[in-house]
Amino acid sequence: MDSQENPSRKIVPIVPVAAAEDDVQMVSLYAATQKIYPRSVQGIFAKWRWFMVVLTQLVFYGLPWIEWGQRQAVLFDLGARRFYIFGFVLYPQDFIYLTAILVISAFSLFLFTAVAGRLWCGYACPQTVYSEIFLWVERKVEGDRSARIRLDGEKMSLEKLFKKVYKHIVWMAIAMWTGFTFVGYFTPIKDLGMEFFLGNMSSWEVFWVFFYAFATYGNAGFMREQVCKYMCPYARFQSAMFDKDTLIVTYDAERGEPRGARSKKADLTTLGLGSCVDCSLCVQVCPTGIDIRKGLQYECIGCGACADVCDTVMDKVGYPRGLVKYSTEHAMKNGWTKEQTLRHVFRPRVILYITILVVVVAALFTSLGLRKPFKVDVVRDRASLARIVAGGKIENVYRLQIMNAAEKAMNYELSVDGLRDISLLLEGDANVAATESRWISVRVQLPYDAATPGSHPIQFKIRAIDEGGHAQSELIEKSVFLVPR
Ligand code: SF4
Ligand code: SF4
């Protein structure tokens, strides 16, 4: 029955209810990248960074071109499973040296970080070094910060197109040369150069040259600070290696605040201002675009550019330098002098890192110094275990891999010991060319009743004889001799 049929029933109007607004807010986690235009800077830390750029790149680009005897001085020949490092020829069996180098690298990083924060990031990391080189090219072609900002804001013109194309060509040339040099550590660089010009490079060589070049071009040309901020894991765990005596780039807030612009002659006490003139130059020079005055931030790579530029500002306004400087939390809190701060560098943790480093480096060099110029692997021939041969003797067959790590051909004298009347038969010679390795089959024989059935330990003695007939060194390798029942 509806309302028309029952007039006593009250009609309630239906009022549309508006959806609750703004209870839930959509928050976008995406933030468009703000391009950073670092201003050029001069000062002591900028000089150190350029020194490291030149040094690391002289080593990187120059090393593959150095000759050592008849070969490239540093070559990681993965195909032949051999590493050549000046006078050393390392085989996969020398893996322990690689381990030692990794331990030294890790503890060096711990040490530098404990002493002075992100020294590696600010001065020697390839990302910093190539960003610095690419930025230098950018400045030469497009001008310093304000000129670059202006150019990017302009409409496309012939001049802008020319500058952009020119910059990218130079960047690509540097990136290609870097990729070529990188591959030159794994394949002889002179041959690689010839192959490049003749168009004979293998597909893997082409892939790695272009891959490494592309990574250099992308990381140093476009991604720069984003690699440090979002991709590099080191930024995330650096704070675990810092303590209150670690030197980090610090803004002296007590001295600098309250910040504010003022005329050069203004009396700070009357104005109630600190030393910071709020010029924002420290932000403009920062390669990661942060403001050091907000305190330590994980984006800070410790490059010291803000300290350099702030010192020049302090010089101009006639205030003492060091408003932004390398200092420690303890030094800032206790007002230590530079000498007092440096005295706290040698704390137990730093001494421990130095001790470990000294021990590992000494062990590495001692081991390299005592290293025999050849290696031998003994493998029992599984196809023929023990057998009875002519003369009623028991024979076991072995394969010896002799790896000659010397730069000259060697002859090897082989003998066996460990059981009465045991003898060794070698077919052919045991000559191995310089830095080569070779498998040699040997038969070891024992009179029938010289040993009881079972497995008996024996030793192979291998002696290296040079071309002049002089014995060089000797190795003993253990194995077993099987006597059947
Ligand atoms: S450069 Fe120095 S004076 Fe200028 S804003 Fe930065 S901290 Fe202040
Ligand atoms: S805050 Fe200073 S030290 Fe840190 S990255 Fe920026 S310029 Fe370099």
Image (spheres, rainbow, N blue to C red):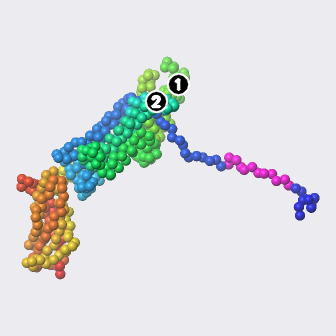
Q: Is residue 166 magenta?
A: no
Picture quarter with the N terminus: bottom right
Residue 476 position, x and y percent, is 15, 62
Residue 270 visible in the snapshot = yes
Query: Does dot 2 land on a helix, a strand or a loop?
Result: helix
Disc 1 residue type? Answer: Ala
Q: Quadrant of residue 338?
A: top left
Report the magenta stretch's main SS.
loop
Residue designated by label 2:
158
Report the front residue among 37 and 143.
143
Disc 2 residue type? Answer: Leu
- Per the rendered image, the range of residues in magenta is 12-23
Cβ of mark 1 under 8 A from ligand 1: no
Query: Does dot 1 land on a helix, a strand or a loop?
Result: loop
Sequence-wise, the earlier of marks 2 and 1 is 2
Q: Is residue 18 magenta?
A: yes
Judged from this view, the residue extending furthest toward the front is 198
Q: Quadrant of ligand 2?
A: top left
215 left or right of 377 in image: right
* Residue at 28% in and 43% down: 197
Residue 18 position, x and y percent, is 75, 49
Report the front residue among 448 and 222.
222
Residue designated by label 1:
261
* Residue at 36% in and 44% down: 213
* Residue at 13% in and 78% down: 388
Report the front residue among 161 and 112.
161
